[in-house]
Amino acid sequence: MAWAVFALLAALAAAATAILAKIGIEGVPSTLATALRTGVVLVLAWGMVAVSGQWAVLPDVSARSYLFLALSGLATGISWLAYFKALQMAPASRVAPLDKTSLAMTIVLAALVLGETITWPIAVGAGLIVIGALMTLTRSPTAIATKRETVGGSSRGWPPLQPPRRPSSRRLASKVCRRI
C-alpha cells in the first residue's frame, strides 16, 4: 500500500497547487505562469534524480521510453497551459473539479490503449466522480436570485457552505506574504 500513500500525497499536492496557482496567477499571463511553475518542477525533478543517484540509468533508457515520455510531457504541458488559463477565467473551486474528470478519462484510455479491465466498481466510481464534478458546476434554479430575494445571506436555493463575503485572492496573498 506504499503506492496509496504516494497517491494521496499527490492528491494533497494537487489540491494545494490549485489554490497556490490561483493566488499566484493574479496579474500574470497564464502562459508565463505555466513556464515559471514548470521551471520549479524541472529543478525539483532533476534535483531528485541527482539525490537518488538515478543519473546512471539515463544511458539505458530506450528510444521508445524517450518517445512516450516526450509525448507525455507534451500532454502535461497542454494540460498545464489549459489549467492555468481556466484558473485565470474562473474560481479554483469550479476549475479543479472539472479538471479531475481526467480520472474517468484515464480509466477509459487505460482500457482502450493498455487493455486494462474496467470492473463495475471502477466504472461506478468514475461515473460518480464525473457526476460530482458536474454538480459543482450547476446551480439550483432558485440560486439565481436577486439580492432582494436573498434570505439570511443565501438564496432560497442551495445554501452556501461558506460565508458569502470572502477575501479576494490579492488580499489573501498579501496576508500570507506579510506573515512570511
Image: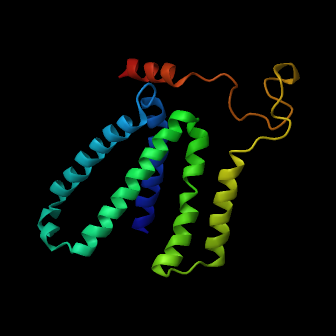
The one of 166 and 130 positioned closer to us in this rendering? 130
Q: Is residue 146 above or below residue 72?
A: above
- Tell me residue 166's x, y (percent): 62, 24
Vertical order, 89 against 49 (above or below): above
Tell me if I can see residue 124 in this picture. Answer: yes
User: Which of the 4 quarters of the picture holds residue 146?
Assistant: top right
Point 32% across, 40% down: residue: 35
Q: As rendered, which of 47 and 70 lies closer to the eye?
A: 70
Q: What residue sits 46% from the left and 48% below the top?
A: 14
Position of the N terminus, as image quadrant, is bottom left
In the foreground, 81 or 60: 81
x, y percentage for residue 2? 40, 66
Q: Is residue 174 left or right of residue 112?
A: left
How has the structure been colored for display? rainbow
> In the figure, is residue 13 to the left or right of 104?
left
- Quarter of the figure with the C terminus: top left
- Tell whether 167 sits left or right of 31: right
Q: Position of residue 9 (x, y in %)?
A: 43, 53
Query: Which residue occupies 54% across, 61% down?
Result: 103
